[in-house]
Image: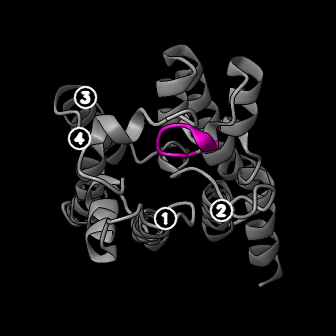
């Protein structure tokens, strides 16, 4: 039990390093929490600092925060459960950073890094093609597609295992359930913002869950600035 607890704590403190906040301060001279969605993640950095900065940040959040804890725990001889606990701890830290008053990003890149760490390539490819290319670049509605993908990755993983194509352990399935639950929770609480004036809470929660924003207009949401 002790390795599990320590793994989660180490992952949480590691994942909680506010990379987007620090990078936006360094490269753009802005507080990323005051721009666009307020999300401390790659997508908001792309919108307000630059595409290259956001892509670099996405790789860091994915490989350094998500993949690295798995590889390190594996190299030290710990079980898959310890590896998964450390990586999921990093997602929790990224989403609710202990250094930023429990504010953070959405953890999508870090979750992708976990799939890389466990070699879950079909699930990752499914997410990149449907969520990233189709949902993000073509449909401009990546949030709802990413949520659907996370849900659909569960039967996909079950099918791969049952058909004998690729082995999927209980740990793998637990990871998929966990990232779905963490995504839903993060979207609903966001960064603890109160609804905008005149916006009913029920509608705000629906928008948050499905579209990861508080209002109907995506362009208005992602382009918000402190100066209005």
Q: Which residue is mark 1?
A: 186
Query: Badge 4: few (under 14), some or many (20 or more) residues near its Cα, within 10 Å?
Result: some
Q: Earlier in the sequence, mark 4 or mark 2?
A: 2
Q: Looking at the picture, does residue 5 appear above or below residue 149?
A: below
Instruction: Give SS at disc 3.
Output: helix
Residues under labels 4 and 2: Cα distance?
A: 24 Å
- The residue under label 3 is 133
Please provide percent x and percent y for residue 170: 44, 73
Residue range in magenta is 33-39
Tell me, yes or no, whether the two marked residues, 3 and 2, touch with CB atoms within 8 Å: no
- Is 196 situated above or below 54? below
Q: How much space separates mark 1 and mark 3, taking CA atoms?
A: 23 Å
Q: Is residue 62 left or right of residue 185?
A: right
Vertically, is 182 above or below 4? Answer: above
Percent x, y for residue 70?
66, 52
Q: CA distance from mark 1 to mark 4?
A: 18 Å
Within the image, what quadrant is residue 10 found in? Answer: bottom right
Question: Which comes sooner in the sequence, label 4 or label 3?
Answer: 3
Majority SS type along the magenta span: loop
Residue under the image location 64 percent in, 32 percent down: 60
Q: Residues within 10 Å of mark 1 (few under 14, many from 20)?
A: many
Mark 4 to mark 3 CA distance (whole Å): 10 Å
Point out which mark residue 141 bears: 4
| Residue 101 included in the magenta stretch of the image | no
Closer to us: 28 or 148: 28
Q: Which mark is residue 96?
A: 2
Asked if the residue under mark 2 is in contact with the one under mark 1, i.e. CB atoms within 8 Å, the reply is yes
Q: What secondary structure is found at the residue carrying circle 2?
A: loop
Quick check: can you spot residue 125?
no
- Please tell me whether mark 4 or mark 3 is closer to you in this view: 4
């Amino acid at each position: 039990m002790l390795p599990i607890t320590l793994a989660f704590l180490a992952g949480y403190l590691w994942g909680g390093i506010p990379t987007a906040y620090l990078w936006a301060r360094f490269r753009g001279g802005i507080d990323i929490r005051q721009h666009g969605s307020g999300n401390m993640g790659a997508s908001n950095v792309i919108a307000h600092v630059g595409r290259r900065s956001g892509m670099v940040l996405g790789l860091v959040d994915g490989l350094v925060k998500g993949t690295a804890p798995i590889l390190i725990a594996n190299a030290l001889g710990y079980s898959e459960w310890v590896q998964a606990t450390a990586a999921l701890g990093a997602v929790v830290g990224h989403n609710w950073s202990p250094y930023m008053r429990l504010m953070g990003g959405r953890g999508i890149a870090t979750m992708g890094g976990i799939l890389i760490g466990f070699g879950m390539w079909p699930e990752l490819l499914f997410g990149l093609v449907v969520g990233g290319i189709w949902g993000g670049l073509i449909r401009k509605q990546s949030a709802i597609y990413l949520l659907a993908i996370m849900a659909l990755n569960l039967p996909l993983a079950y099918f791969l295992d049952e058909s004998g194509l690729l082995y999927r352990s209980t740990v793998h399935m637990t990871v998929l359930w966990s990232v779905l639950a963490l995504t839903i929770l993060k979207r609903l609480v966001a960064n603890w913002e109160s609804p905008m004036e005149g916006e009913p809470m029920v509608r705000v929660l629906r928008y948050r869950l499905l579209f990861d924003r508080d209002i109907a207009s995506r362009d208005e949401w992602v382009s918000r600035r402190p100066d209005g």
